[in-house]
Amino acid sequence: MVNKKKILRLHDNLYLKENRYDKVKNINKKIYKILLKDYKSEDKITDFGCANGELLYFLEKKLLSPSLTGIEVNPKLIKKAKKNVKSAFFKQGSIVKKKIIKKNFTNISICIGVLGIFDNFEKILNNLIYWTKPSGKVIFQVLLNNDPYDVNIKYSHSNKWTINGPKYYESGWNVFSKQTLKNFFKKIPSIKKVKFYEHKISYEQKKNKLDPLRSWTFLYDKKKKLTNGLGMVINEYLIKIDLK
C-alpha cells in the first residue's frame, strides 16, 4: 500500500543542475503581469518554496526597487539562489511550519509548484494568509480539476522498482477540485476576493527525453494542453487572493 511507503520529494534537485535564470518560464511571466496590476514599489514580496530563485531573479530585474524574500526547505537550493539573486533575503524553512516567519511579514505571498506536493492544501493556504499583511495578496499555482474530485498522486520511477515494489514514492502532482478550493475560501473571513487565472497554452514545449516527468504540449480537442510522464492532462491555474 502507498501509505506504508516513504513519500519523498526529490525531483526538485534537478534545479541544482540547471541554469535557466534567463530562460524565463511562462508561468513566471504571468505572475509578473498579475503583480503589475496593483504593485507598489514599497511592497514586500515573498516567494515560498522559491527553489533556486528563478522567479525572484526575474522580478529583481523587472520591478522597481523590489523588496524580495525567498523561503526554501532545501539548503542546497538556498545556496544557489543566494549566488544568483543578490538583492533578495533568503531563509531556510518549511512552508508547513507556521513559525518560520512572523505574522503579517509580507505584502505579497507567492507560492508556485508547492501545493501539489501535499495531500491537504488547507494548512499551506492558512499559513500563507497568516504571513500576509491585511490588504495584501496571496498568489499561488495549482493543478485544478473542474469536476468535484480531489486527486492525490504518488509515483515512482521504474528504476526504483524491486520485487516488493518501489522503495519509496514521490509527490508533487496532486490535483484539487475547483469546488473544494471555493468551499475553503468561503470559510476564511479575511479573504476579500479570489480570482482564478487559467494558464492557457499558446507556446510549444517539447518533451524532455532526459526527464519525461516534466510537462510538454500536445493537441487535445484542437487546443494545446500540457501533459507529463504520468500521463496527465494538466489544467494549471494561478489563483490570486485579495485580503481585507
Image (cartoon, rainbow, N blue to C red):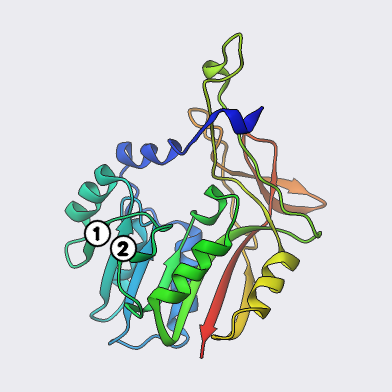
Q: Describe residue 179's horizontal placement relative to residue 128 as left or right.
A: right
Q: Nearer the viewer, residue 243 or 96?
A: 96
Type of amino acid at the residue the image marks with label 2: Ile
Looking at the image, is mark 2 or mark 1 earlier in the sequence?
1
User: Is 234 displayed left or right of 203 in the figure?
Assistant: right
Quadrant housing the N terminus: top right
Q: Position of residue 189 (x, y in %)?
A: 59, 85
Q: Counting other residues with Cα less than 10 Å from the Cα at mark 1, is it few (<14), some (14-19), or many (20 or more)?
A: some
Q: Residue at x 57, y 59 (%)?
A: 121
For this view, does 125 lie left or right of residue 179? left
> Element under label 1?
strand
Q: Residues within 10 Å of mark 2 (few under 14, many from 20)?
A: some
Which residue carries the number 1 mark? 91
Q: Position of residue 216 (x, y in %)?
A: 60, 43
Residue furthest top in the image: 163
In this rendering, the answer to whether 96 lies above or below 233 is below
In percent of the image, x 52 and y 67: which residue is there?
125
The picture quadrant where one finds residue 235 is: bottom right
Q: Secondary structure at mark 2?
A: helix
> How far apart are the alpha carbons under marks 2 and 1?
9 Å
Q: Give the residue drawn at x 72%, y 53%.
A: 150
Q: Quadrant of residue 102?
A: bottom left
Quarter of image, res 214: top right
Give the labeled residue for mark 2.
Answer: 100
**CB contact under 8 Å: marks 2 and 1:** yes
Tag 1: residue type?
Lys
Is residue 90 positioned above or below 52 on the image?
Answer: below
